[in-house]
Image (tube, rainbow, N blue to C red):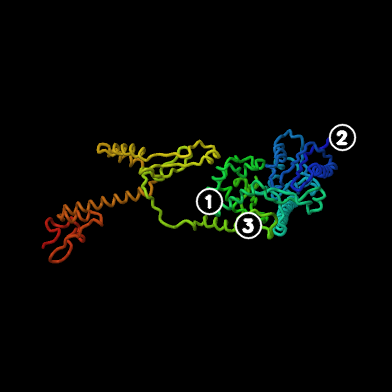
Amino acid sequence: MTAPQPKPFAFYGRVSTEDNQDPESSRSWQLSRATTLIQPHGGQITAEYFDIGQSRSLPWQRRPHASRLLAALRDPRRGFSAVVVGEPHRAFYGNQFGLTVPLFAHYGVELWVPEVGGPIDPGNEAHELVMSVFGGMTKGERNRIKLRVRTAMAAQTLLEGRYLGGRPPYGYTLQDLGPHPNPAKAADGKHLRGLTPDPRTAPIVRQIFHEFLSGSGPYAIAEALTSNHVPCPSAHDRARNPHRSGIAWSKSAVRVILTNPRYTGRQVWNKQRTDEVLLDVDDVALGHTGVMRWNPRDKWVISKEITHPPIIDEAAFEQAQTLLARHRLGLDIPQRQRRARNPYVFRGLIYCAACNRRMQGQYNHGAAYYRCRFPQEYALANDVDHPRNVYLREETLTDPLDTWLATAFHPDQIENTITAMGDAQLGDHPSPAITAARATITECDAKLQRYRAALDAGADPSIVSNCSRPREHRHRAPRCGPCGQSRGLPSARSAADVPPGSANGAR
């Protein structure tokens, strides 16, 4: 009698190295657990899919080996008829089981897990409930780990002032502070590290604070540092900043230094956070992705005590924060109406072709110019071929423009010009200004018709002329001597009903 053929299985597992897990050991015990489940049923693992370093929060479609497994389900020649998972806590997170198991059922592939003791029945409510509980448990476990780690880091920063890793701020370097306080980590030879002033960059930080408190702004400080060939933070540490050019200082880099409390000797943590946002709002099954965002200042955790040598004293730092706050609120800018001393015909309309910035008006020797000043350091940093100053005299624009206007509005061409202007403004949805202008024109046409009717009825032409003028240019209407009434246009009666020769009444 022929022995039954073993049932081919594909094995899936996952391990995250975030907690210093050994991928090989984790794979071994998950594979052993899966083999123990399927061997009594004549199962044999013929294919392996094992993700290393992938978070459990990632859906299967975004895990490299899990996505390969899902793709293999569609292949009739895949070489296996069932999939076994050694540890469902590591395979499924949240609602991932409910989004994945329909694919197995659709392609007729069984899914085995040790907690069920065999294959999962998609129509069994108990199986679905058990797997949903496992998904909720692993999500809750991840959230508890995050909360525990963040709480511990906040306490270590606030109470101990411990350096928790990351890039040292510009002006500091790292020094060895001795064995790690955790015995297990100390046994592995790990040491604590702390911040100490960098002899090359700490004086630059003091210079930035001194110049800012002396009245210089971040832009002027950045330009002066670049002109003096002082390496900017990204140029000073190229290994950590390969994505930046490192050519010139920027005002944002100066502002970051001016607002960093670490220069006062206190440790700071939680300046940034990682938010999980949907990768695709139209496909929630793709899961979330991490986005780094800045926390507001009141969310920062600052140590109570001074933990490393300060570069700036606290009084100077607080004075700098006060100045920055006043600049943001505009308290140092006098609130007055600004009026240009010299008129500019093309004010706000001229742009530089090299950098696409709006050019500024400037008078030189009594003539109007438009200027674009671009510091050479920033031209190099932004790879822009830009002269230090670009000048354009206003007369070079006004003379040809006046010539064109004189031609366009010549009596022989004015009708065509007005028609072209009207055609350019017409549309299905005219602007509010055009609508208001059309309403004004309609009202004026109605008034002219009334004035013409009054003249035809015998009204005094001088009175009609006075009424047609703007209000500020009108003369006082003549009045009738005997009765004192204005000899104006008929009001109560229609002009068409006034007999000729008696429109103003008899004297």
x and y, in percent, of residue 341 in the image: 37, 50
Q: Residue at x 89, y 33 (%)?
A: 1
Question: In the displayed structure, does residue 283 sit left or right of residue 352?
Answer: right
Measure how far apart labels 2 and 3 are at the Cα level: 84 Å
Disc 3 + disc 1, Cβ < 8 Å: no
Q: Residue at x 54, y 54 (%)?
A: 214
Camera sees residue 124:
no
x and y, in percent, of residue 317 in the image: 60, 56
- Which residue type does callout 2 highlight? Ala
Q: Residue at x 82, y 39 (%)?
A: 43
x and y, in percent, of residue 457 in the image: 16, 54
> Which mark, residue 3?
2
Q: How many numbered discs, if any?
A: 3
Question: In the displayed structure, does residue 419 sit left or right of residue 52?
Answer: left
User: Quick one: SS at disc 3?
Assistant: loop
Disc 2 + disc 3, Cβ < 8 Å: no
Asked whether 499 or 77 is in front, the reply is 499
x and y, in percent, of residue 479 in the image: 16, 62
- Which residue type does callout 3 highlight? Asp
In which quadrant of the rendered image does the C terminus lie?
A: bottom left
- Which residue type does callout 1 highlight? Gly
User: Quick one: SS at disc 2?
Assistant: loop
Mark 1 / mark 2, whichever is N-terminal: 2
Measure how far apart labels 3 and 1 are at the Cα level: 20 Å
Residue 77 higher or lower than 218, as above or below:
above
Nearer the observer: mark 1 or 2; the answer is 1
- Judging by the rendered image, the residue that carries numbered circle 3 is 313
Mark 2 / mark 3, whichever is N-terminal: 2
Nearer the observer: mark 3 or 1; the answer is 3
- Judging by the rendered image, the residue that carries numbered circle 1 is 217
Measure how far apart labels 1 and 2 are at the Cα level: 86 Å
Camera sees residue 491:
yes
